[in-house]
Image (tube, helix red, strand yellow):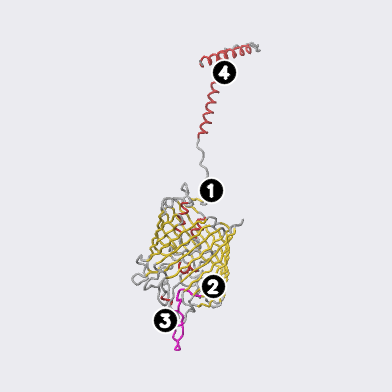
Amino acid sequence: MSGIVSGRAQSSRRRVLSLLLAAVLTVPVAGAVHAQSLDKLIDRLEKLERENRELRKEIEAIKAAQNRKPPSPPAAAAGPARAYGKSPAGFVRTDSQFGYEILDPTNAINRKERLVLHRKRDGILAPGGLYLQGAITPIANHQSSNRADKFGYLMRHPTAKNQVGKTVSEAAIHSVQLGATATLGDWIAGHAQALFDPEQSFGAGTNTSIDRNQLQMRQAWVLFGDFDRSPFYASLGKMAVPFGLTDTVNPFTASTVWHAFGGLANGVKAGYSQQGLNLTLMGIQGGVQFRAANTPVKGTAVPGLLNNLAVDASYELRLDRVGTLLLGGSYQRGSAYCQDYPVQHFEPCHDNNPAFGIYGRLITGPFTFKAELARTTDVWPGTFNPDMPQFAASKVTAFDLGAKYRLERGGGPLDLSVEFSRFTAGPGGAPWEKQDQIVLGVAWFVEPSVKLFAEVVRTAGYAPLNFISGGSIMAMDPDGTRKVDNTRTHSDRSARSSILLVGANVAF
């Protein structure tokens, strides 16, 4: 039916065209009248019409093909990580906020493995990436003491080789950190951190000597775990010992509890973390470790046996309309306080001296409150000097109390803090009885990874661990012979130091 209608329409069009052409060709033209075939003209017009239709079809086909072309991939969504490299997702990356967190020496000091697992679960650390970090901490300070060459401030080694007289000042690099965290798939990660710290290095000489200006591998471990699949995890390598909280509310100065019990050792760690409950067990290499761990190996300090351990358990309660409350406790089989008289760093012990710790932290609104206590279970043999028998050997105790208030402001958060901490190593009246530290601090976070800070610090007592109860003070015999006077010690419970300090912690 449609074919019949189409044929009739075509026949009518041809008749109309014939009539129009006939009318035109009847007009006389000068010189001659040229008659042309009506059929040829009609055929030419129809040919032009067919070509026009074909051109339109081609144009429509081109438009349709363009509409079917897949859209260009959208630009990567803005996020905390900036990707570089040749791989599609960017293998080498940086995340300034994670860089600050993983290198921060004031918070989560012995919980960095859990931090990595949480950031992986949060999507901050993507699988198959290498995240680079770095942090620089310059400081300037002025210190005064009522005793020549005796400054109790522990953020630099208190020795007369670096602090002479009763007034000292400095503007220097306190530390530089370089780190890398690799997320090798869903359940394996690795982390390494190099540290440059001439002010707290155990190297010999002044702060500018080559031995103290070395780059060391502070931590390096491989982590196994995926919090999306299991609450269990494990790590192997050189890492912080899970003993106590050892964090501080201060912007820079470490708590005395960390100075006394914050451990760093080779070992293997296993943990469990779910619904606020955290359990951690670490097998620690024996002998003298890098910090705060010492268990004798066949009467030596040689780390030839995995015979030390630490265990920590904590629970974080979420209090409705109040905040969070963290409570925890720790035990370590071999602390650093087991050496005989005279005490020297990294010397062997005859027996191990265990330690325990308890801690708590309350975060409510803009306020943070914390408290911690750590103590050895036995006396420290080296705190008894046989030439001063009136002072009995003592257990070692450290505690702190701290509070912080965060003021949210347009230019970045501002933290105001105060913390008191004490180290006790002798009986009442002993020159090495105790050392107190109180810190008033202010920190301004210009950026999440840039902190400017100032502190006023007051210390009471001077009790450095090396030769704490004597054994190094030289005297002169009447015949001119030099010898050690064991009735004297460089510890001084009456020493007082005041410190005014400013600095910055800049991380990426």
Q: Which residue is mark 1?
A: 78
- Magenta: main secondary structure equals loop
Which residue type carries mark 4?
Leu
Q: Which residues are magenta?
A: 462-487
Which residue type carries mark 3?
Pro
Q: Which residue is mark 3?
A: 386
How many discs mark residues in the rendered view? Answer: 4
Q: Secondary structure at mark 1?
A: loop
Distance between the Cα atoms at labels 4 and 1?
61 Å
Q: Which residue is mark 4?
A: 45
Q: Outermost residue, front direction? A: 320
Q: Position of residue 396 (x, y in %)?
A: 45, 72
Front residue of this view, candidates 293 and 289: 293
Q: Nearer the viewer, mark 4 or mark 3?
A: 3
Distance between the Cα atoms at labels 2 and 4?
107 Å
User: Neighbour class for label 2 at 10 Å: few (<14), some, many (≥20)?
Assistant: many
